[in-house]
Image (spheres, rainbow, N blue to C red):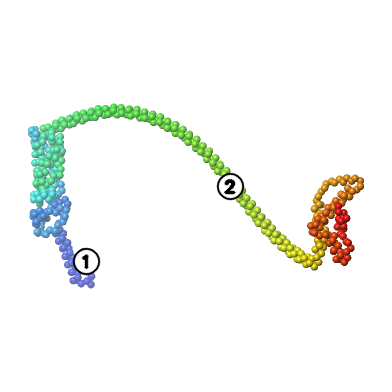
Amino acid sequence: MMLAVSPDVPFAVIVFFGAVLFIVLAIVITIAKLVVVGNPNEMVVITGGTGREGVGYRVLIGGRRIVIPVINRVMRITLRNMQVSLEVKAQSGGGTMMPITVTGVANVKVSSDPAVRGAAIERFLGEPVQEMQRVARETLEGGLRAVIGKMTPEEIVEDRDKFVQTVMDEVSDDLRKLGLVIDSVNIQNVHDEEQYLESIARKARAEVISAARKAEAARAAEAVVKEAEANAAARKAKAARDAEAKKIEAQSHQAAEQARLAAEKAIAEADNDLRIRKAELAREAALKEASQQEAEAEAERARLTATEVARALAARDVAKAKAEGDAAHTLEEGKARAAAIEQIGKAIQQHPDALKVMLVEMTPEIVQRLASTIEGVDLGNVTVIDGGNGKAVAGAALGRAKVLTETLATVESVLGIDLRKLTRNVAKNVTGKDDGFVPANVAHETENPE
């Protein structure tokens, strides 16, 4: 890619920036070549120096290190599992000397243990993977032959787990010396040319089948026994449940009857309470109505009382006004009477007989008032029986005159005035002479004392 260069930029600047870019790229490439990065599934061996173990190399697993070209050399050993195929033909032990062929597969890998990996570095560094597989296969087959020579065919066939574990224990130390470790061994097939193992297998299968049948028969018999026991237990449990059900049913009936009686009692009590409550409510309603009526009556009484009070207040105001008017009238009348009495007093002082004259002038009114007291006396039908001389009739006729004469005598006694003498004095003062004038009524009384 061509970069466009502005004609205004000096050439020296362009050269400078180009040189800087070249140096940066050179540094990056150099660092990339100097830095070694290891993966977790591989062992990086850096030679050309002294490592921590005191040997002439350093080991890197899953890290990074800086190496110096020419001085250091970097090589790698894989830590992945290597699958090794096995096929061994050997004579079994236990005195049988039966040739047996065993095929299987083993998983082997280089150990990352610092105490073991040095042997693998010394033996397999720079070697291909196939070389490690070959060494591992030969070691495993040698151990497998040794194990077959120690075990009988029956043991190899009947207990594969024991056979595999024996093989792994046999070869572990040999592989450790090579810097390898065995992860697993899988025995795929065990057979012999004389079919001895097959006959053993058939016998074993027969025994297994027989044992299975016996076990099945035993299980069937046990199942029958268990079924019988279960049926007996079920019948017993059913009888117990039936008895319990009957008991519960009886208790339920009894409880239901008790509940029914209790319900009837509760209903009766509730009805009684309801009637009592209704009566209480009716009484409360009546009391409330009576109280309301009383309240209305009280309100009416209060209204009437207020009306009466208003009327009484009005009557009081009217009476007060009338009393004030009467009092004013009485006061004026009293003032007038007092003035009149004062004038009369002055006249009496000037004329002593004036009082007597006034009393004489009042005598007819007094007599009239006194006479009026007997006007209401009703004697009913009075029958006068005369002896022929006329005195009885005359006495009856003069009865009223006699009553009047006695009344005048009473007036003279009350007033303390001698009417006859008063009359003569007045006549003398008027005519200037004493002609012996006597009022008619006084003369009549004098002449007829009875």
In x, y percent, where is residue 436?
88, 61
Q: Which residue is mark 2?
A: 292
Front position among marks 2 and 1: 2
Image-based side of 371 in relation to 131, left or right: right
Crowd band around label 1 with a 10 angstrom C-alpha radius: few (<14), some (14–19), many (20+): few
Distance from disc 2 to disc 1, alpha carbons, whole Å, reads 116 Å
Q: Nearer the viewer, residue 366 or 202?
A: 366
Q: Quadrant of residue 280?
A: top right
- Image quarter in which the N terminus is found: bottom left
Residue at 12%, 41% in the rendered image: 169
Residue drawn at (81%, 64%), measured in percent from left and top?
353
In the image, residue 284 above or below residue 320? above
Q: Nearer the viewer, residue 3 or 271?
A: 271
**Residue drawn at point x = 91 percent, y = 46 percent:** 388
Disc 2 crowd rating (10 Å Cα; few below 14, some 14-19, many 20+) is: few
Determine whether, in the image, residue 376 is placed left or right of residue 266. Answer: right
Amino acid type of the residue that numbered disc 2 sits on in the rendered structure: Gln
**Residue 284 location, x and y as percent?**
55, 43
Q: Is any atom of residue 130 visible in this view? A: no
Question: Please, is residue 19 above or below residue 215 in the view?
Answer: below
Instruction: Determine whether 99 is above or below 72 in the image.
Output: above
Which amino acid type is marked by label 1? Leu
Label of residue 381 in the image: none
Which quadrant of the figure has residue 411?
bottom right
Find numbered disc 1 in the image and state the secondary structure of the residue it sits on. Answer: loop
Q: Earlier in the sequence, mark 2 or mark 1?
A: 1
* Of the pair 231 and 172, the residue shown nearer to us: 231
Residue receiving disc 1: 3
Query: Closer to the camera, 444 or 40?
Result: 444
Across and down, in percent, residue 327 comes to 71, 61
Residue 87: % across, % down: 11, 40
